[in-house]
Protein backbone atom coordinates (compact mmCIF):
# COMPACT_ATOMS: atom_id res chain seq x y z
CA UNK A 1 0.00 0.00 0.00
CA UNK A 2 1.43 3.38 -1.04
CA UNK A 3 0.63 6.51 0.94
CA UNK A 4 0.00 9.86 -0.70
CA UNK A 5 0.82 13.01 1.27
CA UNK A 6 -0.91 16.35 0.86
CA UNK A 7 1.80 19.00 0.64
CA UNK A 8 -0.74 21.82 0.79
CA UNK A 9 -1.99 21.57 4.37
CA UNK A 10 -2.03 25.24 5.56
CA UNK A 11 -1.31 24.49 9.23
CA UNK A 12 1.74 22.43 8.31
CA UNK A 13 3.03 25.05 5.89
CA UNK A 14 2.64 27.69 8.62
CA UNK A 15 4.59 25.56 11.10
CA UNK A 16 7.42 25.08 8.61
CA UNK A 17 7.49 28.79 7.79
CA UNK A 18 7.62 29.68 11.50
CA UNK A 19 11.01 27.99 11.69
CA UNK A 20 12.49 29.03 8.35
CA UNK A 21 11.65 32.71 8.99
CA UNK A 22 13.82 32.64 12.12
CA UNK A 23 16.85 32.75 9.84
CA UNK A 24 15.62 35.49 7.50
CA UNK A 25 18.72 37.38 6.38
CA UNK A 26 21.02 34.36 6.73
CA UNK A 27 23.21 33.97 3.63
CA UNK A 28 23.49 30.61 1.94
CA UNK A 29 25.49 28.36 4.24
CA UNK A 30 29.24 28.17 3.70
CA UNK A 31 30.16 25.63 6.31
CA UNK A 32 33.16 23.77 5.04
CA UNK A 33 35.76 22.82 7.62
CA UNK A 34 38.95 20.86 7.91
CA UNK A 35 40.20 19.33 11.16
CA UNK A 36 43.34 17.35 11.86
CA UNK A 37 43.03 14.85 14.71
CA UNK A 38 46.27 13.57 16.19
CA UNK A 39 46.24 9.82 16.81
CA UNK A 40 47.90 7.87 19.59
CA UNK A 41 50.31 6.31 17.10
CA UNK A 42 51.52 9.66 15.87
CA UNK A 43 49.40 9.56 12.71
CA UNK A 44 46.96 12.33 11.92
CA UNK A 45 43.36 11.92 10.85
CA UNK A 46 42.41 14.71 8.47
CA UNK A 47 38.67 15.28 8.31
CA UNK A 48 37.10 17.54 5.71
CA UNK A 49 33.48 18.13 6.45
CA UNK A 50 30.46 20.36 6.02
CA UNK A 51 28.84 22.06 8.97
CA UNK A 52 25.95 24.41 9.63
CA UNK A 53 27.13 27.98 10.07
CA UNK A 54 24.61 30.48 11.42
CA UNK A 55 26.03 33.98 10.97
CA UNK A 56 23.01 36.03 12.06
CA UNK A 57 23.43 37.93 15.30
CA UNK A 58 21.23 37.04 18.25
CA UNK A 59 19.70 40.52 17.98
CA UNK A 60 18.60 39.83 14.41
CA UNK A 61 17.26 36.40 15.33
CA UNK A 62 15.25 37.96 18.18
CA UNK A 63 13.75 40.51 15.77
CA UNK A 64 12.80 37.70 13.40
CA UNK A 65 11.19 35.72 16.21
CA UNK A 66 9.21 38.72 17.41
CA UNK A 67 7.88 39.26 13.89
CA UNK A 68 6.90 35.59 13.61
CA UNK A 69 5.17 35.69 17.00
CA UNK A 70 3.16 38.78 16.04
CA UNK A 71 2.05 37.14 12.79
CA UNK A 72 1.03 33.98 14.66
CA UNK A 73 -0.77 35.84 17.49
CA UNK A 74 1.64 34.57 20.13
CA UNK A 75 3.16 36.30 23.17
CA UNK A 76 6.14 38.34 21.98
CA UNK A 77 9.49 37.45 23.53
CA UNK A 78 11.38 40.30 25.17
CA UNK A 79 14.65 38.39 25.05
CA UNK A 80 16.11 35.34 23.39
CA UNK A 81 16.01 32.17 25.48
CA UNK A 82 19.04 30.72 23.79
CA UNK A 83 18.82 29.28 20.29
CA UNK A 84 15.93 27.03 21.33
CA UNK A 85 12.76 27.36 19.26
CA UNK A 86 9.45 25.74 20.12
CA UNK A 87 6.68 24.43 17.88
CA UNK A 88 3.53 23.27 19.65
CA UNK A 89 1.36 20.91 17.59
CA UNK A 90 -1.57 18.86 18.77
CA UNK A 91 -1.20 15.10 18.44
CA UNK A 92 -2.43 13.84 15.08
CA UNK A 93 -1.80 17.04 13.12
CA UNK A 94 1.43 15.94 11.43
CA UNK A 95 4.21 17.01 13.80
CA UNK A 96 6.77 14.55 12.43
CA UNK A 97 5.91 15.42 8.83
CA UNK A 98 6.38 19.09 9.68
CA UNK A 99 9.84 18.78 11.13
CA UNK A 100 11.00 16.47 8.33
CA UNK A 101 9.75 18.95 5.75
CA UNK A 102 11.40 21.75 7.71
CA UNK A 103 14.73 19.96 7.20
CA UNK A 104 14.32 20.08 3.42
CA UNK A 105 13.11 23.68 3.51
CA UNK A 106 16.05 24.84 5.63
CA UNK A 107 18.35 23.16 3.15
CA UNK A 108 16.59 24.77 0.20
CA UNK A 109 16.65 28.30 1.64
CA UNK A 110 19.92 28.34 3.59
CA UNK A 111 21.79 25.20 2.50
CA UNK A 112 21.89 23.76 6.03
CA UNK A 113 22.79 20.10 5.74
CA UNK A 114 23.37 18.47 9.13
CA UNK A 115 20.42 17.49 11.33
CA UNK A 116 20.15 15.32 14.43
CA UNK A 117 16.74 14.09 15.61
CA UNK A 118 16.84 13.28 19.32
CA UNK A 119 14.10 11.00 20.65
CA UNK A 120 13.29 9.95 24.23
CA UNK A 121 12.45 6.29 23.60
CA UNK A 122 12.83 3.38 21.22
CA UNK A 123 9.10 3.48 20.44
CA UNK A 124 9.32 7.06 19.17
CA UNK A 125 12.57 6.29 17.36
CA UNK A 126 10.88 3.50 15.41
CA UNK A 127 8.07 5.88 14.49
CA UNK A 128 10.50 8.51 13.24
CA UNK A 129 12.37 5.96 11.14
CA UNK A 130 9.12 4.77 9.58
CA UNK A 131 8.16 8.36 8.76
CA UNK A 132 11.53 8.98 7.14
CA UNK A 133 11.01 5.91 4.98
CA UNK A 134 7.43 6.58 3.89
CA UNK A 135 7.92 10.32 3.22
CA UNK A 136 11.22 10.01 1.34
CA UNK A 137 9.72 9.73 -2.13
CA UNK A 138 7.23 12.51 -1.34
CA UNK A 139 9.97 14.94 -0.30
CA UNK A 140 12.16 13.96 -3.23
CA UNK A 141 9.30 14.97 -5.50
CA UNK A 142 8.76 18.27 -3.66
CA UNK A 143 12.42 19.25 -3.55
CA UNK A 144 13.74 18.18 -6.93
CA UNK A 145 15.43 14.96 -5.86
CA UNK A 146 17.70 16.75 -3.42
CA UNK A 147 20.20 14.14 -2.18
CA UNK A 148 19.38 13.20 1.40
CA UNK A 149 20.53 10.41 3.65
CA UNK A 150 19.26 9.29 7.03
CA UNK A 151 20.70 6.86 9.50
CA UNK A 152 20.06 5.64 13.02
CA UNK A 153 22.90 5.93 15.48
CA UNK A 154 24.23 2.45 16.20
CA UNK A 155 26.74 2.06 19.02
CA UNK A 156 28.21 -0.98 17.24
CA UNK A 157 28.92 1.08 14.10
CA UNK A 158 30.18 4.36 15.51
CA UNK A 159 32.52 4.97 12.58
CA UNK A 160 29.43 5.86 10.52
CA UNK A 161 29.41 9.29 12.18
CA UNK A 162 32.41 10.17 10.03
CA UNK A 163 30.23 9.89 6.95
CA UNK A 164 27.66 12.09 8.67
CA UNK A 165 30.32 14.75 9.15
CA UNK A 166 32.03 14.77 5.77
CA UNK A 167 29.03 14.39 3.44
CA UNK A 168 27.95 17.38 1.37
CA UNK A 169 24.33 16.17 1.22
CA UNK A 170 21.46 16.47 3.69
CA UNK A 171 22.37 14.19 6.58
CA UNK A 172 19.78 13.16 9.18
CA UNK A 173 20.95 11.23 12.25
CA UNK A 174 18.29 9.74 14.56
CA UNK A 175 19.53 9.06 18.07
CA UNK A 176 17.99 8.03 21.38
CA UNK A 177 18.80 10.45 24.21
CA UNK A 178 20.01 7.58 26.39
CA UNK A 179 22.70 6.75 23.82
CA UNK A 180 24.68 9.86 24.71
CA UNK A 181 23.33 11.18 28.02
CA UNK A 182 26.02 9.56 30.17
CA UNK A 183 29.78 10.00 30.13
CA UNK A 184 30.28 6.25 29.83
CA UNK A 185 28.19 5.92 26.65
CA UNK A 186 30.10 4.51 23.67
CA UNK A 187 29.58 7.69 21.65
CA UNK A 188 31.77 9.56 24.16
CA UNK A 189 34.57 6.98 24.31
CA UNK A 190 37.77 7.24 22.24
CA UNK A 191 37.53 4.85 19.30
CA UNK A 192 40.47 3.18 17.52
CA UNK A 193 38.63 3.26 14.19
CA UNK A 194 38.51 7.04 14.52
CA UNK A 195 42.18 7.45 15.44
CA UNK A 196 41.32 7.52 19.11
CA UNK A 197 38.75 10.30 18.81
CA UNK A 198 35.29 10.21 20.34
CA UNK A 199 32.44 9.61 17.87
CA UNK A 200 30.54 12.53 19.36
CA UNK A 201 33.31 14.90 18.23
CA UNK A 202 32.34 14.32 14.60
CA UNK A 203 28.78 15.36 15.45
CA UNK A 204 29.91 18.38 17.46
CA UNK A 205 32.16 19.68 14.69
CA UNK A 206 29.31 20.02 12.18
CA UNK A 207 27.10 22.13 14.49
CA UNK A 208 23.96 20.12 13.68
CA UNK A 209 20.50 21.58 13.85
CA UNK A 210 19.06 19.42 16.62
CA UNK A 211 15.38 18.48 16.46
CA UNK A 212 14.05 17.29 19.82
CA UNK A 213 10.94 15.12 19.56
CA UNK A 214 8.84 15.24 22.76
CA UNK A 215 11.27 17.49 24.69
CA UNK A 216 9.17 17.35 27.87
CA UNK A 217 10.70 13.90 28.36
CA UNK A 218 14.20 15.37 28.24
CA UNK A 219 14.01 18.16 30.80
CA UNK A 220 16.28 16.65 33.46
CA UNK A 221 19.60 18.39 33.93
CA UNK A 222 21.47 15.32 32.64
CA UNK A 223 19.41 15.15 29.46
CA UNK A 224 19.52 18.89 28.83
CA UNK A 225 23.31 18.82 29.14
CA UNK A 226 23.38 15.85 26.77
CA UNK A 227 21.58 17.84 24.06
CA UNK A 228 23.92 20.80 24.62
CA UNK A 229 26.87 18.41 24.30
CA UNK A 230 25.95 17.89 20.63
CA UNK A 231 27.06 21.50 20.04
CA UNK A 232 23.90 22.39 18.08
CA UNK A 233 23.71 25.38 15.79
CA UNK A 234 20.19 25.66 17.21
CA UNK A 235 17.58 23.38 18.75
CA UNK A 236 14.04 22.91 17.40
CA UNK A 237 11.55 21.48 19.88
CA UNK A 238 8.34 19.73 18.78
CA UNK A 239 5.53 18.42 21.00
CA UNK A 240 1.86 18.73 21.89
CA UNK A 241 2.65 18.85 25.61
CA UNK A 242 5.69 21.03 26.21
CA UNK A 243 6.85 21.63 29.74
CA UNK A 244 8.73 24.80 28.75
CA UNK A 245 7.88 26.98 25.76
CA UNK A 246 11.28 28.41 24.85
CA UNK A 247 10.90 31.04 22.11
CA UNK A 248 7.49 29.75 20.99
CA UNK A 249 7.05 30.48 17.27
CA UNK A 250 4.04 28.33 16.37
CA UNK A 251 1.12 26.93 18.34
CA UNK A 252 -1.60 24.58 17.17
CA UNK A 253 -3.32 23.73 20.44
CA UNK A 254 -6.22 21.26 20.90
CA UNK A 255 -8.94 23.91 20.59
CA UNK A 256 -7.48 25.38 17.40
CA UNK A 257 -6.91 21.91 15.94
CA UNK A 258 -10.53 21.00 16.64
CA UNK A 259 -11.82 24.26 15.16
CA UNK A 260 -9.83 23.59 11.98
CA UNK A 261 -11.28 20.09 11.74
CA UNK A 262 -7.85 18.49 12.08
CA UNK A 263 -8.76 16.29 15.04
CA UNK A 264 -11.96 14.77 16.37
CA UNK A 265 -13.43 14.96 19.82
CA UNK A 266 -13.40 11.78 21.83
CA UNK A 267 -16.46 10.47 23.61
CA UNK A 268 -16.19 9.35 27.21
CA UNK A 269 -18.71 7.05 28.86
CA UNK A 270 -18.26 6.49 32.57
CA UNK A 271 -19.30 3.49 34.63
CA UNK A 272 -18.44 3.69 38.31
CA UNK A 273 -19.53 2.64 41.79
CA UNK A 274 -18.01 5.51 43.71
CA UNK A 275 -21.29 7.38 43.64
CA UNK A 276 -23.40 4.38 44.53
CA UNK A 277 -23.61 5.56 48.10
CA UNK A 278 -25.77 2.63 49.19
CA UNK A 279 -22.69 0.38 49.17
CA UNK A 280 -19.87 0.71 51.72
CA UNK A 281 -17.01 1.83 49.53
CA UNK A 282 -13.56 0.90 50.89
CA UNK A 283 -10.28 0.75 49.00
CA UNK A 284 -6.95 -0.30 50.52
CA UNK A 285 -4.18 1.96 49.22
CA UNK A 286 -1.16 0.80 51.21
CA UNK A 287 0.57 0.27 54.54
CA UNK A 288 3.00 2.35 56.59
CA UNK A 289 4.69 2.46 60.00
CA UNK A 290 4.00 5.31 62.41
CA UNK A 291 6.53 6.85 64.80
CA UNK A 292 5.83 4.13 67.36
CA UNK A 293 6.58 1.44 64.74
CA UNK A 294 2.94 0.39 64.70
CA UNK A 295 1.52 -0.75 61.38
CA UNK A 296 -1.07 1.54 59.81
CA UNK A 297 -3.15 0.98 56.71
CA UNK A 298 -4.21 3.76 54.35
CA UNK A 299 -7.72 3.37 52.95
CA UNK A 300 -10.13 5.42 50.90
CA UNK A 301 -13.71 5.63 52.16
CA UNK A 302 -16.67 7.95 51.58
CA UNK A 303 -17.29 10.52 54.30
CA UNK A 304 -20.39 12.53 55.15
CA UNK A 305 -19.64 16.28 54.93
CA UNK A 306 -21.67 19.47 54.92
CA UNK A 307 -21.25 19.54 51.13
CA UNK A 308 -22.42 15.95 50.75
CA UNK A 309 -20.64 12.62 50.44
CA UNK A 310 -16.97 12.99 49.50
CA UNK A 311 -14.07 10.52 49.12
CA UNK A 312 -11.68 10.60 52.07
CA UNK A 313 -8.29 8.93 52.63
CA UNK A 314 -7.74 7.88 56.24
CA UNK A 315 -5.09 5.94 58.17
CA UNK A 316 -6.38 3.05 60.26
CA UNK A 317 -5.02 0.52 62.73
CA UNK A 318 -6.51 -2.33 64.78
CA UNK A 319 -9.93 -1.40 66.24
CA UNK A 320 -10.34 1.64 63.99
CA UNK A 321 -14.05 2.19 63.33
CA UNK A 322 -15.05 3.28 59.83
CA UNK A 323 -18.44 4.34 61.13
CA UNK A 324 -16.76 7.09 63.15
CA UNK A 325 -14.20 7.94 60.47
CA UNK A 326 -16.91 8.30 57.83
CA UNK A 327 -18.79 10.95 59.76
CA UNK A 328 -21.18 8.29 61.09
CA UNK A 329 -22.55 7.15 57.77
CA UNK A 330 -25.06 4.40 58.39
CA UNK A 331 -23.61 2.25 55.64
CA UNK A 332 -20.45 1.77 57.77
CA UNK A 333 -22.29 1.04 61.06
CA UNK A 334 -22.35 -2.75 60.62
CA UNK A 335 -19.15 -3.66 62.48
CA UNK A 336 -16.69 -2.03 60.07
CA UNK A 337 -14.10 -2.22 62.84
CA UNK A 338 -10.58 -3.33 61.90
CA UNK A 339 -9.96 -6.83 63.21
CA UNK A 340 -6.73 -7.80 61.42
CA UNK A 341 -4.08 -6.45 59.04
CA UNK A 342 -1.58 -8.52 57.07
CA UNK A 343 1.23 -6.76 55.21
CA UNK A 344 2.55 -9.96 53.64
CA UNK A 345 -0.78 -10.92 52.09
CA UNK A 346 -1.75 -7.25 51.72
CA UNK A 347 -5.23 -7.25 53.25
CA UNK A 348 -7.29 -5.64 55.99
CA UNK A 349 -10.13 -7.57 57.62
CA UNK A 350 -13.09 -6.18 59.57
CA UNK A 351 -15.07 -7.71 62.43
CA UNK A 352 -18.04 -8.27 60.14
CA UNK A 353 -15.91 -10.65 58.07
CA UNK A 354 -15.28 -8.29 55.15
CA UNK A 355 -11.74 -8.37 53.74
CA UNK A 356 -10.24 -5.80 51.37
CA UNK A 357 -7.10 -6.46 49.32
CA UNK A 358 -4.49 -3.91 48.26
CA UNK A 359 -5.50 -2.11 45.09
CA UNK A 360 -9.09 -3.38 45.14
CA UNK A 361 -12.20 -1.96 46.73
CA UNK A 362 -14.60 -4.27 48.47
CA UNK A 363 -17.51 -3.63 46.18
CA UNK A 364 -18.64 -6.95 44.78
CA UNK A 365 -19.67 -5.60 41.40
CA UNK A 366 -16.29 -4.69 39.90
CA UNK A 367 -16.50 -7.43 37.31
CA UNK A 368 -19.99 -6.27 36.40
CA UNK A 369 -18.66 -2.77 35.89
CA UNK A 370 -15.93 -4.04 33.56
CA UNK A 371 -18.43 -6.12 31.60
CA UNK A 372 -20.74 -3.12 31.31
CA UNK A 373 -17.86 -0.98 30.03
CA UNK A 374 -17.01 -3.61 27.42
CA UNK A 375 -20.65 -3.91 26.38
CA UNK A 376 -21.10 -0.15 25.98
CA UNK A 377 -17.86 0.12 24.01
CA UNK A 378 -18.84 -2.68 21.65
CA UNK A 379 -22.27 -1.14 21.09
CA UNK A 380 -20.79 2.30 20.33
CA UNK A 381 -18.19 0.71 18.07
CA UNK A 382 -20.80 -1.17 16.06
CA UNK A 383 -22.93 1.96 15.70
CA UNK A 384 -19.95 3.86 14.31
CA UNK A 385 -18.96 0.99 12.02
CA UNK A 386 -22.44 1.12 10.55
CA UNK A 387 -22.44 4.91 10.31
CA UNK A 388 -18.99 5.19 8.67
CA UNK A 389 -19.13 2.09 6.49
CA UNK A 390 -19.82 3.96 3.25
CA UNK A 391 -17.13 6.56 4.05
CA UNK A 392 -14.42 3.91 4.49
CA UNK A 393 -13.40 5.35 7.86
CA UNK A 394 -11.64 2.96 10.21
CA UNK A 395 -13.13 2.68 13.71
CA UNK A 396 -10.81 1.83 16.58
CA UNK A 397 -11.81 1.20 20.19
CA UNK A 398 -9.28 0.90 23.00
CA UNK A 399 -9.47 -0.72 26.42
CA UNK A 400 -6.93 0.13 29.11
CA UNK A 401 -6.78 -2.74 31.59
CA UNK A 402 -5.21 -3.30 34.99
CA UNK A 403 -3.41 -6.59 34.38
CA UNK A 404 -2.27 -8.40 31.24
CA UNK A 405 -3.41 -11.73 32.69
CA UNK A 406 -6.98 -10.45 32.75
CA UNK A 407 -6.81 -10.45 28.96
CA UNK A 408 -4.40 -13.24 28.09
CA UNK A 409 -1.81 -15.39 29.81
CA UNK A 410 0.13 -18.62 29.27
CA UNK A 411 0.08 -22.02 30.94
CA UNK A 412 3.20 -23.94 31.95
CA UNK A 413 3.53 -25.31 28.40
CA UNK A 414 3.39 -21.86 26.81
CA UNK A 415 -0.15 -22.27 25.50
CA UNK A 416 -2.37 -19.20 25.45
CA UNK A 417 -5.02 -19.01 28.17
CA UNK A 418 -7.92 -16.61 27.74
CA UNK A 419 -8.37 -14.19 30.62
CA UNK A 420 -11.73 -12.99 31.87
CA UNK A 421 -11.71 -9.81 29.77
CA UNK A 422 -10.91 -11.86 26.66
CA UNK A 423 -13.86 -14.15 27.40
CA UNK A 424 -16.25 -11.31 28.23
CA UNK A 425 -15.35 -9.47 25.03
CA UNK A 426 -15.99 -12.46 22.80
CA UNK A 427 -19.20 -13.36 24.61
CA UNK A 428 -20.63 -9.84 24.37
CA UNK A 429 -19.39 -9.26 20.81
CA UNK A 430 -20.99 -12.49 19.56
CA UNK A 431 -24.26 -11.47 21.15
CA UNK A 432 -24.31 -7.95 19.69
CA UNK A 433 -23.00 -8.74 16.19
CA UNK A 434 -25.74 -11.32 15.71
CA UNK A 435 -28.47 -8.69 16.02
CA UNK A 436 -30.17 -7.77 12.71
CA UNK A 437 -28.96 -4.14 12.87
CA UNK A 438 -25.29 -5.14 12.87
CA UNK A 439 -25.19 -8.46 11.09
CA UNK A 440 -22.53 -8.39 8.36
CA UNK A 441 -21.08 -4.93 8.99
CA UNK A 442 -17.72 -6.36 10.13
CA UNK A 443 -16.48 -8.93 7.58
CA UNK A 444 -13.85 -10.51 9.83
CA UNK A 445 -13.67 -13.53 12.06
CA UNK A 446 -13.92 -13.02 15.80
CA UNK A 447 -10.23 -13.85 16.37
CA UNK A 448 -9.18 -11.07 13.99
CA UNK A 449 -11.13 -8.16 15.45
CA UNK A 450 -9.43 -7.80 18.83
CA UNK A 451 -5.92 -8.09 20.20
CA UNK A 452 -3.69 -6.90 23.01
CA UNK A 453 -0.68 -4.61 22.85
CA UNK A 454 1.60 -5.13 25.84
CA UNK A 455 5.25 -5.56 26.73
CA UNK A 456 6.62 -8.98 25.92
CA UNK A 457 9.27 -11.08 27.57
CA UNK A 458 12.11 -12.89 25.79
CA UNK A 459 9.71 -15.64 24.73
CA UNK A 460 7.36 -13.02 23.26
CA UNK A 461 4.84 -13.67 26.04
CA UNK A 462 2.74 -10.77 27.25
CA UNK A 463 3.87 -9.28 30.56
CA UNK A 464 3.11 -6.46 32.97
CA UNK A 465 6.79 -5.42 32.86
CA UNK A 466 7.49 -1.75 33.54
CA UNK A 467 11.26 -2.00 33.22
CA UNK A 468 12.85 1.17 31.93
CA UNK A 469 15.13 -0.75 29.56
CA UNK A 470 13.31 -0.98 26.25
CA UNK A 471 13.88 -3.48 23.48
CA UNK A 472 12.83 -3.39 19.85
CA UNK A 473 10.74 -6.52 20.26
CA UNK A 474 8.41 -4.73 22.62
CA UNK A 475 7.52 -2.07 20.12
CA UNK A 476 8.42 -3.38 16.70
CA UNK A 477 5.05 -4.40 15.36
CA UNK A 478 3.15 -1.32 16.50
CA UNK A 479 4.77 1.47 14.43
CA UNK A 480 6.30 -0.58 11.65
CA UNK A 481 3.09 -1.13 9.71
CA UNK A 482 1.06 1.84 10.92
CA UNK A 483 0.62 3.13 7.37
CA UNK A 484 -1.96 0.38 6.88
Image (cartoon, helix red, strand yellow):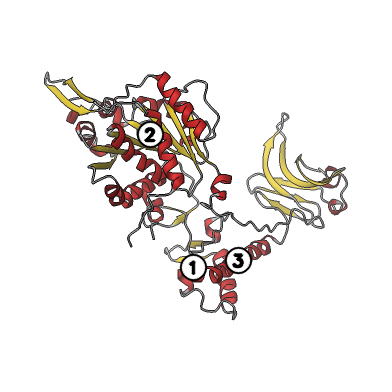
Label 2 or label 1, whichever lies nearer to me, is: 2
| Helix, strand or loop at mark 3 | helix
Label 2 or label 3, whichever lies nearer to me, is: 2
Marks 3 and 1 sit apart, C-alpha to C-alpha, by: 17 Å
Q: Look at 23% across and 31% down and name the residue there.
A: 165
Where is residue 308? Give x, y as percent.
84, 47
Sequence-first disc among 2 and 3: 2
**Picture layout, residue 274 above or below residue 67:** below
**Picture layout, residue 90 above or below residue 83:** below
Q: Nearer the viewer, residue 63 or 394?
A: 63
| Pointer 2 residue | 20
Determine whether, in the image, residue 159 is placed left or right of residue 317: left
Q: Nearer the viewer, residue 419 or 127?
A: 127
Q: Quadrant of residue 156?
A: top left
Q: Residue furthest bottom?
A: 436
Marks 2 and 3 sit apart, C-alpha to C-alpha, by: 44 Å
Sequence-first disc among 2 and 1: 2
| Pointer 1 residue | 391
**Picture layout, residue 287 above or below residue 333:** above
| Pointer 3 residue | 380
Determine whether, in the image, residue 290 is placed left or right of residue 16: right
In the picture, the quarter occupied by the C terminus is bottom left
Where is residue 19? Give x, y as percent.
41, 34
Crowding near pointer 1: few (<14 within 10 Å), some, many (20+)? few
Where is residue 20? Give x, y as percent.
38, 34
Sequence-first disc among 3 and 1: 3
Amino acid sequence: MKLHFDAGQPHQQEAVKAITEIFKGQPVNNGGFEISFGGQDGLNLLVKGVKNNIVLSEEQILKNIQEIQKNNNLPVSSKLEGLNFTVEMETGTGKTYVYLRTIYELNKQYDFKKFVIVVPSIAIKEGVIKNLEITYEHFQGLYGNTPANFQVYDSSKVSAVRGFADSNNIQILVINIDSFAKDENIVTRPNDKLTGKQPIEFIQNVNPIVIVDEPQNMETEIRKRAVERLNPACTLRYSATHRNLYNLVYSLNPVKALDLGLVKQIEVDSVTTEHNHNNAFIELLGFKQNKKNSIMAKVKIERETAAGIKPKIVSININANLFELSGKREIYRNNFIVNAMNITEKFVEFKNGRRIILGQNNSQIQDEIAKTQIERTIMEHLKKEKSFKTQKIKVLSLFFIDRVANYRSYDENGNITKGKIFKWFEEIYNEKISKPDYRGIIPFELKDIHNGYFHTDKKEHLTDSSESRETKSRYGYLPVNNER
